[in-house]
Image (cartoon, grey):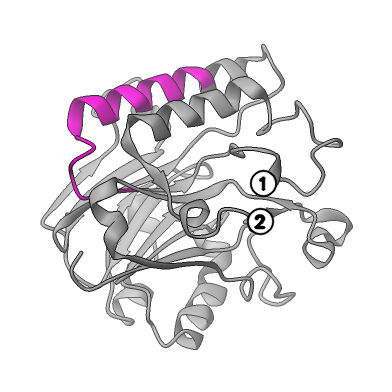
Amino acid sequence: MKICTYNVNSIRAREELMLKWLEKRDKDIDVLCLQEIKVTEDRFPRGAFAGLGYHCEVFGQAGFNGVAICSKEKPEQVLPGFGDETWDRQKRIVCCRLAGLTVVNVYAPHGDLRGKEKYLYKQEWYSNFLKYLEQNFSPSDPLLVVGDLNITRDDLDVFDPVLLRDTIGTMPEERHWLTSVLEWGLVDCFRFLNPGEQAFTWWDYTTGAIWQNRGMRIDYILCTRPLLKNLAAVEVDLWPRRRRVPTPSDHAPVIATFGVTV
């Protein structure tokens, strides 16, 4: 089973690229988790994905945010949002139960400089997300949490720790918020298999950052420990990000491969 997380930065703008990429990979992705789709449910290109054999569960928003899970196996249960009207004004989370496990797809807030309104929202969002995990799941469950978390774990996850020190995504308190989520009972799959390897998942559109590998790792596949025995590989697929036409997202997809006994 291959699980993928991909911030597409607008599904309508990236539809052609994604279909080409999935065909290039011989449609080997079993569960495709998308963030920042920027469309409502009725505007999501379900037909295109259905043509490749995917069922799509969408929790969307016009012009901003939005998440979707597209899977080859139809989910047994779908839980959009936190179940809280206030927090679900921004569409940032969708949960599906399928193939004997639970997948939670999240698009965490980007934030802002320390003390700003968006910084405070990000802080509160992470606190609420931790409560969501505590109230709905157990570390002993077969659980995957994937998505764009908009925080780097440590300096290995940025191309220049000195230049980027204490900026959005690298602030010590932000890393503490992410660490709190991990300490609840989740493992960073990429770092587990590649403890000393540097790989990025996001590059700014300007200054040719992708070609100079001036990036950050902010997209994650996290799993509970019961799934670790089945974790076989994690890769960042650079092909979609290195396209000039169709225009790529500023993120690259991350794919984890699990053994068939998941």
Of the image marks 2 and 1, the number of the one nearer the N terminus: 1
State the mark number for residue 258: none
Main SS, magenta residues: helix
Q: Amino acid at mark 2?
A: Phe
Q: Residue at x 70, y 75 (%)?
A: 243
The local crowd at label 1, few if under 14, some if 14 to 19, many if 20 or more residues have their Cα within 10 Å, is: many
The local crowd at label 2, few if under 14, some if 14 to 19, many if 20 or more residues have their Cα within 10 Å, is: many
* Vertical relation: 252 (above or below) 90: below
In the image, residue 237 lies at what x, y percent?
57, 71
Residue that lies at the very extreme toward the left in this rendered image: 76
In the image, residue 193 lies at what x, y percent?
48, 59
Q: Which residue is mark 1?
A: 157
Does residue 141 show up magenta in the picture? Answer: yes
Pointer 2 with pointer 1, Cβ within 8 A: yes
* Vertical relation: 80 (above or below) 260: above
Instruction: Describe the element under mark 2 as helix, strand or loop.
Output: loop
Quadrant that contains the N terminus:
bottom left
Q: Amino acid at mark 1?
A: Asp
